[in-house]
Image (cartoon, grey):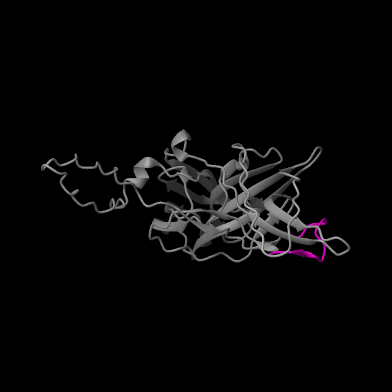
Amino acid sequence: MGNDSAMLPAGINTYPFQFQLPGNLPSSFEGQYGYVRYWLKSTIDQPWKFDHTTKTAFTVICLLDLNREPTASEPRQGHDEKTLCCWCCKSGPISAVFRIDRGGYVPGEAITLNVEINNSSNRKVNGSSVNFKMVTKYHARCKTKTQSRSLAKIKHGEFKQGENDIWSGERLIIPPVPPSFLTGCRIIDIHYYLELKVDPSGPAFDLCIPFEIIIGTIPLQHIVQQFPPIPPPQTYPPVPAYGGATPSDPVNPAPIGPPPSYADCVFGKVNIKEQNDDDYTKGNMDFAPQYTYYNWGHTPSAPPPPEEEVE
């Protein structure tokens, strides 16, 4: 963001600086086929010696307010059924209904899952699962690559023909991830999906019900109000002024919900060394972007085994 240089005398020197970041920057992101990365590099030019260079990365977060997304507060519901055939025999259907209470969440929130699976077929069902995944599209001039990564997963076991499987109130916790869409970046696009999958036994395709959900950085206001507000700082009556007059009492600000913290991306650290960085470039080259995380007391979901698809 600048190429200014300065002559520094021998000894310890402090060189304060600041940059005003543009307001439309996309969020930091590290992916397999592309990234949005912000870093600072400082170089000391030593005559007749190798330069001393230090590099450090930092996170930028583009705000995504769920209160401005019309579909974020709307419930999601899907229904599907599959009829199994074996040669000339056709059995009853396997049907499923999948519901969640809304379409927008922030990292740290719990998604409450409600699922009803009815097995009217003549086969058992091997099991069912709900998978929360992140789908990233990398757009080049003539080609688009798609990467799908699993973030959290819950499984149910098998059940027999004529039986039902009911999910009631099981929860997936949103881990620290970048906000949906990667606003401000035209070549990388991020979407999040919940997918119910029912696996019938025998030769048959799975029954799948997917939902797209929006991951934001600012939660829905009516959700924030469900959590205890942060108490305002304690105030004491002011000392009366000379003559007994007492200044008017200060007005305490309205209590607000728990503020977000910041946590390393669920995918962990990556090496940020680039072609222009040589062996004399110092600094921590392992970096993980930090994203907003609302620690509202939910127990995190068990991380799924590595599961990645590339198209």
Q: Considering depth in this image, is 128 or 25 the residue closer to the camera?
A: 25
Which residue appears at 54% of the width and 65% of the height? 303
Which residue appears at 43% of the width and 43% of the height? 102
Looking at the image, how many numbered discs can be counted on the residues? 0
Residue 181 spot, x, y in % from top left: 60, 41
- In the displayed structure, would residue 66 be above or below residue 154? above
Image-based side of 239 in relation to 306, left or right: left
- In the displayed structure, would residue 157 be above or below residue 80? below
Q: Considering depth in this image, is 144 or 31 the residue closer to the camera?
A: 31
Residue 137 spot, x, y in % from top left: 69, 45
Q: In the rendered structure, which segment of residues is drawn in magenta?
A: 272-284
Q: Does residue 108 appear in this view?
A: yes
Q: Quadrant of residue 110?
A: bottom left
Image-based side of 176 in relation to 253, left or right: right
Residue 63 spot, x, y in % from top left: 53, 42
The residue positioned farthest toward the right in the image shown: 48
Is 130 colored magenta in this rendering?
no
Q: Does residue 124 appear in this view?
A: no
Q: Considering depth in this image, is 66 or 239 the residue closer to the camera?
A: 239
Residue 241 spot, x, y in % from top left: 16, 44
In the picture, the quarter occupied by the N terminus is: top right
Which residue appears at 47% of the width and 42% of the height? 103
Q: Considering depth in this image, is 284 or 177 the residue closer to the camera?
A: 284
Determine the main secondary structure of the stretch shown in magenta: loop
Q: Quadrant of residue 13?
A: bottom right
Image-based side of 89 in relation to 118, left or right: right
